[in-house]
Amino acid sequence: MTSTAATEQRPRTESGRLNLLGLDAAGLDELLQELDEKPFRSKQLRQWLHQRRVFDFDEMTDLAKGFRGKLVDLAELRVPKAIFDRESADGTRKWLLALESGQAVETVYIPERGRGTLCVSSQVGCALDCGFCSTGKQGFNRNLSAAEIIGQLHYATQALEDEGRERRVTNVVMMGMGEPLANFRNVVAATNLMVDPYAWGLSRRRVTLSTVGLVPALYRLTDVSNISLAVSLHAPNDALRDEIVPINRKYPLRELLPACEHYLGNTPHHCIYWEYVMLDGVNDSDAQARELAALLRHIPSKINLIPFNPFPGTRYEASPRERIHRFADILQNAGFITTIRRTRGQDIDGACGQLVGQVINRRNQGKRGTTSANA
Ligand code: SAH
């Protein structure tokens, strides 16, 4: 087998091979250099893997036989498989995708007029423990590899194509299970492939990373990426955000907001998308809407109000419809473009915050029932 110190360090599949799907342009360039192959092979490979989605090295006829032989020895191509598949009355689709480790994550496809959005997971579980999110309640197990993240796009694209219903993925949101910035390297590699013209070729406006706001990672992201940024705010001040989004105690608003402005100042984007989940009697008053408007007044912003999607055991309740509209009106009158997210896929537990997958919680192993699934 051909390998060097650097290839040894790359994540491998159970068979010990490198899953080539997870290498972005820079990763492939590096590999090619190690294999003593020409740099232009990198583009060819990305086109085979991500555009034509050909997984048999022998079919990659414009690659020299010797090079194909090296790839056969070193690498393989693996896409996660669905072990569960549900379609909502509103057309939203949810797949539970099995990973090699015996765990599973959820991926959701949301068809809308003229576009199709894939909601992609970045971790098995989540360590952040936001009280209103069922993924957080599962605990955390591990980061997904870049191949497992981009593999969700592969799986969904193929599954939709096979069904022949003219559905396809035009947008990706990193809003599934997990905190994308806590799995920085792999999420960056996978999202690079999504916007790479030789791979998935999606516009950077159509690939959105949603984060709770891990400040140091946000600064690092500014240097290596330029996809759209959505930030889960959920409160107009630190006292309340500390309670709803516990990581705020570590990265308070006075640090988070400048990090977001830094992203805007150094990428081609014109605004931050703020997400704000509407929790009855907690963060949804008129005064809180005004406080939110004051907080964001200097930052180019679009605000997306998310109706809370309940799940068993949560202590929160959804704000009434009229409250959400009133809150939106106040923000709109203050000059913010404000939208109310349409709840999709609730009947299949596919809506925001309802994804639980199959997580074996590493933090609590042995303490309580450790496996959870909603399949
Ligand atoms: N960790 C990332 C991505 C997670 S999910 C983040 O926090 O942004 C994407 C969005 O769904 C986030 O804004 C999250 O706060 C929201 N969300 C989580 N649970 C929810 C629920 N039960 N109802 C409505 N929105 C929820």
Image (tube, rainbow, N blue to C red):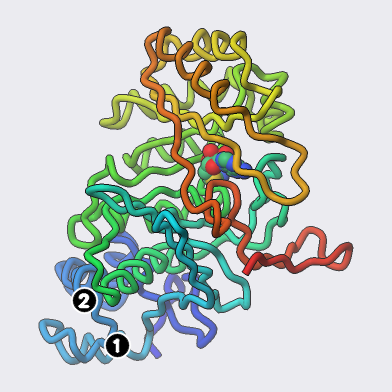
Determine the secondary structure under disc 2: loop
Q: Nearer the viewer, residue 22 or 314?
A: 314
Residue 7 lies in what quarter of the image? bottom left
Q: Is residue 143 above or below residue 20?
A: above
Few, some or many residues within 10 Å of mark 2 (<14, 14–19, 20+):
some
Which residue is most to the right? 367
The residue that label 2 is drawn on is 37
Image height of 158 relative to 264, above or below:
below
Name the amino acid type tagged 1: Lys
Q: Nearer the viewer, residue 347 or 132?
A: 347
Q: Position of residue 202 (x, y in %)?
A: 24, 52
Q: Residue at x 56, y 78 (%)?
A: 100
In terms of depth relative to the viewer, which is nearer, 292 or 109? 109
Mark sitting earlier along the chain (1/2)? 2
- Quadrant where the N terminus sits is bottom left
> Left or right of 316: which side holds 46?
left
Which numbered tag is attached to residue 70?
1
Q: Are marks 1 and 2 in contact (CB under 8 Å)?
A: yes
* Residue 10 in the figure: left or right of residue 213: left
Q: Nearer the viewer, residue 192 or 81?
A: 81
Q: Position of residue 88 (x, y in %)?
A: 47, 59
Residue 189 visible? The answer is: no
